[in-house]
Structure formats: structure tokens, C-alpha cells
Image (tube, rainbow, N blue to C red):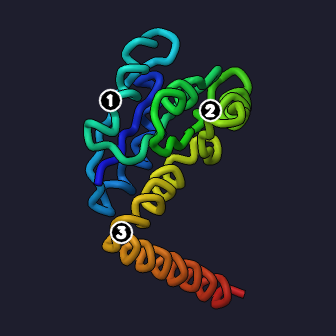
Amino acid sequence: MKVAIVMGSDSDFPVVEKGLKILKEFGVETEVRVISAHRTPDIAVSFGENAEKNGIEVIIAAAGKAAHLGGVLAAVTTLPVIGLPIKSSTLDGLDSLLSIVQMPKGIPVATVAINGAENAGLLAIQILSLKYEELKKKLVVYRENMVKQVEEKDNLIQSKI
């Protein structure tokens, strides 16, 4: 099981790293690349066209501003592509979000929240869990732990009031 995380700029890495951490916690192999849809379009197309052949099963595409990376990759592969809009200084990431979610009919890109790298990683894991039972089991435990954490925080607040 392998997920590619592709980002349009190395400045996206502090956000991307959070999703990478989740994938590693679940034991998912990753390939992380910096590829620009605009500055290196030939490399982007080649990467997308060869992703499946290279063992990749899901692609997370992180991009800011015009955020065309996910769409370019989705246009040249049938693999699931998850768009991760990166908050830019221009419009607080709204430009990125709208660029990713407004894909034309026939070329979908699933999209998570602006800077939502953790959810991008978890969505990739959920997709993979359809094929890999061990990931499904780990997701159940992950969610059970979230419940426990919320209950602990609730108990702490209740003890203070």
C-alpha cells in the first residue's frame, strides 16, 4: 500500500508533514515529491501517468493559490486524487479551495479543508482500507482513541465546574 503526496512548492511541507505523519502512523508507505503543475507541467503529467505503474494507489495533491496540481494529476490517472488546499497569503486559501473543488465533470478530485493534511491522510487510509483489512482495523482503533480523548477532556471540564 502506497500513497503519493505531491506538493506544488516546498513551502507547503509544514502543512503536508501532518498528513505524512498520520500515514506513517498507520504504516502506509509514502512517496513525497515537489512538482509544480505550472513550473514543471511535463514532470507532473509524467508522474500522474506512471503513478499506478509505480505502485501508488492514492495521490494527495497539496497546492496553494491557483492549485491546479490535483486536477492535472487527476486528468492523467484513474487513481483517486485527494486535493489539499494550502492557505496562501493572498486569499487565506479560499482561492486554493475553490480551484480544487471546481473540477469539471468527469475528472473528480476529492477535497479536504484548507490546510487539512490530517484529513487528507485519513481519507487516503479510508480508501486503502477497502482493500487492506489491517488498515480498517487500525481506523477503528484510531476512532476509539478519539472517543476516549474527548471523554477525558469532557471529564476534566466537568471536574472544573
Q: Which residue is mark 2?
A: 87
In this image, 135 relative to 99: left or right? left
Q: Earlier in the sequence, mark 2 or mark 1?
A: 1
| Circle on res. 82 | none
Residue at point 49%, 45% (across, down): 80
Of 78 and 160, nearer the camera is: 78
Q: Secondary structure at mark 2?
A: loop
What kind of residue is marked 1? Asn
Alpha carbon distance from label 2 to label 3 = 30 Å
Q: Which residue is mark 3?
A: 135
Q: Quadrant of residue 16?
A: top left
Residue 47 drawn at (x, y percent): 36, 25
Q: Secondary structure at mark 1?
A: helix
Residue at point 37%, 74% (across, down): 138
Q: Quadrant of residue 99?
A: top right
| Circle on res. 50 | 1
Alpha carbon distance from label 2 to label 1 = 29 Å
What kind of residue is marked 2? Lys
